Amino acid sequence: MTVRKNQANLTSAEKKAFVDAVLEVKRIGVYDEFVAAHRLRFALDMNTGVYVGHFGPSFLPWHRKFLIDFENELQNVDPSVSIPYWDWTFDNTVAASVWAPDLLGGTGRPLDDQVMDGPFAYSAGKWPINIQVDSRPFLARNLAYRVPTLPTRAEVDAALAMPTYDSAPFRDGSAGFRSTLEGSAGYMSMHNRVHTWVWGQMESSVSPNDPVFWLHHAFVDKLWADWHALHPTSAEYLPAGGTVDVIDLNETMPPWTNTTPQSMLDHTLFYTYA
Ligand SMILES: [Cu+2]
């Protein structure tokens, strides 16, 4: 059974196994398929008005399935590996262990935001940026540059306290837990703010180019699970049906042909959180 752990609690051996599996999925070309899939979905969400991966209720189940698929690829390389999560409310500085050279490496250099240490530095030779939105072939970050602080535990707790998953019109800024957690209810808040805090590729449609994408979204996913545990009688997902341009509970989420929000509600079918 897959157990997802807080990155702060990983042993050195667990960190190395995770990094090695990510590098191998990259080497065989599969990693970039995930980057391309996210870029495509983000563009469709932005430009077609049909909200599947972002800006609507299926933000959470879509990313849950996306992470499960990626975790399966990691486990094809090393069955012991799972996606760790990064609690950015607690490990909230550039000195946090997630940015150490034995896990993700640190912030970029001033000249061009190029990450210079860790396994994903361009100079280490194993992490070319192939699926791009600009011409930079290297992983870029500028931690705490565009916004100085990450979301706080109090902000997270306020979102978790909301009893409603999502509400009409089920879009950017709708009242309820999903939109508040996604960060569309306020400029650069919550999930969105974390992407912006990291900067570089993380602040773009090709954000999975930075492996912190998976650790960030694993924590967002855990917060969805935490929210349901706090509100066991609330509908775990809304809307239940009949909503135009929005994925209802039993509608299929592209690009998959066999995945609905309903099929993603119980994460314990796939993994648990430690
Ligand atoms: Cu995200």
Image (cartoon, helix red, strand yellow):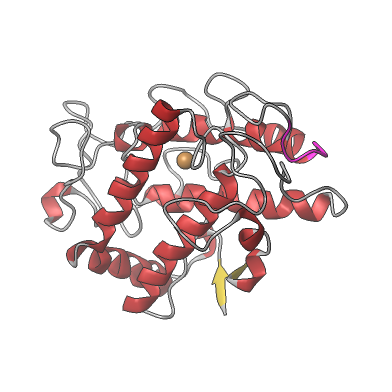
Q: Which residue is drawn at 72% across and 33% down?
A: 154
Residue 86 visible in rendering: no
Q: Nearer the viewer, residue 271 or 108?
A: 271
**Residue 187 at x, y = what percent?**
55, 19
Q: Which of 15 and 140 is in front in this view?
A: 140
Magenta highlight range: 161-167
Q: Locate residue 179 relative to residue 59 in the image: left or right.
A: right
**Residue 134 at x, y = what percent?**
18, 30
Membership of 164 in magenta stretch: yes
**Residue 243 at x, y = what percent?**
66, 36
Q: Residue at x 51, y 58 (%)?
A: 65
Q: Locate residue 42 relative to residue 3 in the image: left or right.
A: left
Residue 183: name its quadrant: top right
The rendered magenta stretch, by its main secondary structure, is classed as loop
Q: Which residue is drawn at 46% across and 22% down?
A: 147
Residue 38: name its quadrant: top left
Residue 265 visible in rendering: yes
**Residue 79 at x, y = what percent?**
41, 80
Q: Residue at x 55, y 64 (%)?
A: 5
Image position of 170 with respect to 209: above or below? above
Membership of 166 in magenta stretch: yes
